Amino acid sequence: MDRAQKEKVVEELGQIFESSGVVVVSRYEGMTVAEMQDLRARMREAGGSVRVAKNKLAKIALEGKAASSISNYLTGMTVLAYSEDPVAAAKVIDAYAKDNSKLEILGGAMGETALDVDGVKAVAKMPSREELIASIVGCIGAPASNIAGAIGAPASNIASILSTIEERGEAA
């Protein structure tokens, strides 16, 4: 890899570290190509990405970035998992690590906040952006449906009362 290629990789990694909601560092020693492709596919489905890069280049890209706290995790065979959604990458990595003992979570960063292994697992348990949006929409929509039900209820009550009176009148 020549100097220009290294500079390009450092620039790409710098953009990843700046724009990602979460970055998780894991050790992948012993994983097969098929297992890595499976991890990449799962991450893609969740809206995240996986990147294997030279640790030295990643450390250079981290200089001056909010996620610089993860540089001490960059030793050995490491893989970076990241996503804009602050929860997606952590969820996928945590789930994959439970299924595959060859993937070991080392830590990560959420903005300026450093995450250890337990921190990454705690983030993985949080609801995703889509789940939060659905919850908020449900909370906003519930009062509107209650109001619509309350407005419609008196009309149906009056109609049932009138039909009962009509039935009584016919019976008499």
Image: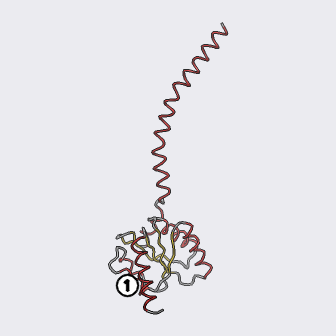
- Residue occupying the far bottom of the picture: 2
Q: Tell me what residue is drawn at x 57 percent, y 67 percent.
A: 45
The picture quadrant where one finds residue 62 is bottom left
| 95 vs 9, nearest the viewer | 9
Residue 13 percent across, percent down from the top left: 43, 79
Residue at the extreme top = 172
To which quarter of the image does residue 98 belong? Answer: bottom right
User: Residue 6 at what x, y percent from top left?
Assistant: 44, 88
Please tell me which residue is depicted at 53% across the width and 68% down the height of the picture: 92
- Identified at 66% across, 10% down, the residue is 170
Left or right: residue 45 compared with residue 15: right
Quadrant (top left/top right/bottom left/bottom right) for the C terminus: top right
Q: Residue at x 47, y 83 (%)?
A: 53
Q: Outermost residue, front direction?
A: 4
Query: Tag 1's secondary structure?
Result: helix
Residue at the spot of label 1: 60
Taking the image as shown, residue 161 lies to the left or right of residue 112, namely right
Residue 164 rendering spot, x and y as whole percentages: 61, 16
- Residue sticking out furthest to the right: 171
Q: Classify 10 Å Cα crowding around label 1: few (below 14), some (14-19), many (20 and above).
A: some
Does 137 appear above or below 82? above
* Position of 143 relative to 49 (above/below): above
Residue 144 screen position, x and y as percent:
47, 39
Question: Looking at the rendering, which quadrant does residue 33 occupy?
Answer: bottom right
Relative to residue 111, is residue 33 drawn left or right?
right
Note whether 85 is above or below 70 in the view shown: above
Mark 1 belongs to which amino acid? Ile
